[in-house]
Image (cartoon, rainbow, N blue to C red):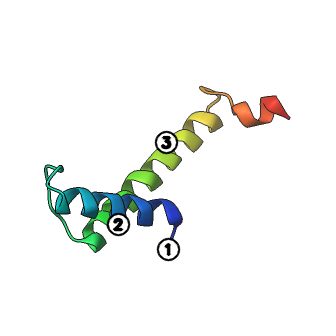
Amino acid sequence: MGLLPRVAAAVAVKAAEQGVSRRSLTWKDEYNRAKEIIASTRLMIETLYGKGLIKNLLEDLA
């Protein structure tokens, strides 16, 4: 279990409890949704790095 999806799920559930979210899903549903979003974003960034379309700024700082 990664930290970021757990935090995202906890925030989403709390927002639903407080009535400030548009949807009300279970913690597990929110966790799985966050994992999917994070994984697809990481894959997209890695693909862009691999094709040379974006630079890795952390390497430039070293």
Q: Are marks 2 and 1 in contact (CB under 8 Å)?
A: yes
Between circles 3 and 2, the one closer to the viewer is 2
Q: Residues within 10 Å of mark 2 (few under 14, many from 20)?
A: many
Q: Which residue is depicted at the point 49% across and 42% down?
A: 44
Quadrant location of the C terminus in the rendered image:
top right
At label 2, the amino acid type is Tyr
Residue type, numbered disc 1: Met
| Of the image marks 3 and 2, the number of the one nearer the N terminus | 2
Name the element at disc 1.
loop
Residue that badge 3 annotates? 44
> Residue 48: which disc?
none
40 or 8: nearer the viewer: 8
What is the x, y in percent for residue 58?
A: 74, 36
Closest to the observer: 57 or 10?
A: 10
> What distance separates the C-alpha of mark 3 from that of mark 2?
20 Å
Using the image as rendered, state which of residue 23 and residue 46 is in the foreground. Answer: 23
Disc 1 and disc 3 in contact, CB within 8 angstroms: no
Determine whether, in the image, residue 48 is placed left or right of residue 39.
right
Residue drawn at x 43%, y 66% is 6
> In this rendering, is residue 36 above or below 53?
below
Mark 1 vs mark 3, foreground winner is: 1
Judging from the image, what secondary structure is the residue with disc 2 in? Answer: helix
In the rendering, at what x and y percent does residue 16 appear?
18, 59
Identified at 61% across, 32% down, the residue is: 51
Q: Which residue is mark 1?
A: 1
- First reached walking from the N terminus: tag 2 or tag 1: 1
Specify the farthest residue to the right.
62
Which residue shows up at 54% across the image and 40% down it?
45
User: Is residue 12 depicted above or below 6 in this figure?
Assistant: above
